[in-house]
């Protein structure tokens, strides 16, 4: 287990559901990854890099809803600026994306 946080600390994390609208290869990344464009409704479209190439093909990711942290400071990854953090469960070297069981409005909060 990592460091314990307070409930107040948790409430500062802005978790939202978005839909992947574009998937590009990211050959410049140190580890195999995709560049994702994710639609968060009223929050707009945000970019992210995700190391999910072992379990997901580009065409399977299109229109998939996922859960992301949208209030991280943008992070430079090579020449790409990642604007949100895609969440997934780590299973060895594989990452399984977290997603809602049923389709929800883009930008819906997760609590």
Image (cartoon, rainbow, N blue to C red):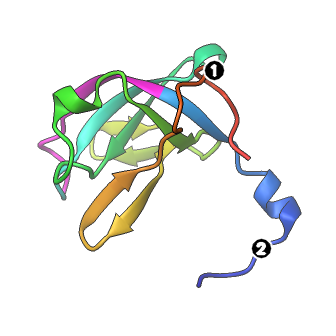
Which residues are drawn in magenta? 19-30
Residue drawn 21% across the image and 43% down it: 56
| Residue 75 falls left or right of residue 91 | right
Residue where numbered disc 2 is placed: 5
Dot 2, how many residues are within 10 Å of its Cα: few (below 14), some (14-19), or many (20+)? few
Between 107 and 102, the one nearer to me in the picture: 102
User: Is residue 26 one of those drawn in magenta?
Assistant: yes
Q: Position of residue 26 (x, y in %)?
A: 18, 39
* Circle 1 residue: 43
**What residue is shown at x 78% (from left), y 51% (from top)?**
12
Q: Position of residue 81 (x, y in %)?
A: 40, 37
Q: Quadrant of residue 107?
A: top right
Asked which quadrant contains residue 88, the reply is bottom left
Q: Is tag 1's residue or tag 2's residue first in the polypeptide sequence?
A: 2
Position of 96 relative to 22 (above/below): below
**75 with respect to 110 (left or right):** left
- CB under 8 Å between discs 1 and 2: no
Q: In the rendered view, does 56 fall on the left or right side of 85? A: left
């Amino acid at each position: 287990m990592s460091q314990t946080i307070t409930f107040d600390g948790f409430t500062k994390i802005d978790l939202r559901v978005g839909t992947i609208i574009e998937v590009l290869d990211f050959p410049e990344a140190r580890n195999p990854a995709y560049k994702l464009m994710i639609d968060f409704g009223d929050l707009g479209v945000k970019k992210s890099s995700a190391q999910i190439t072992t379990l997901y093909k580009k065409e399977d990711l299109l229109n998939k809803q996922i859960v992301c942290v949208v209030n991280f400071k943008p992070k430079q990854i090579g020449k790409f600026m990642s604007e949100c953090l895609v969440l997934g469960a780590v299973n060895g070297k594989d990452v399984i994306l977290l997603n809602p069981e049923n389709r929800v409005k883009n930008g819906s909060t997760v609590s």
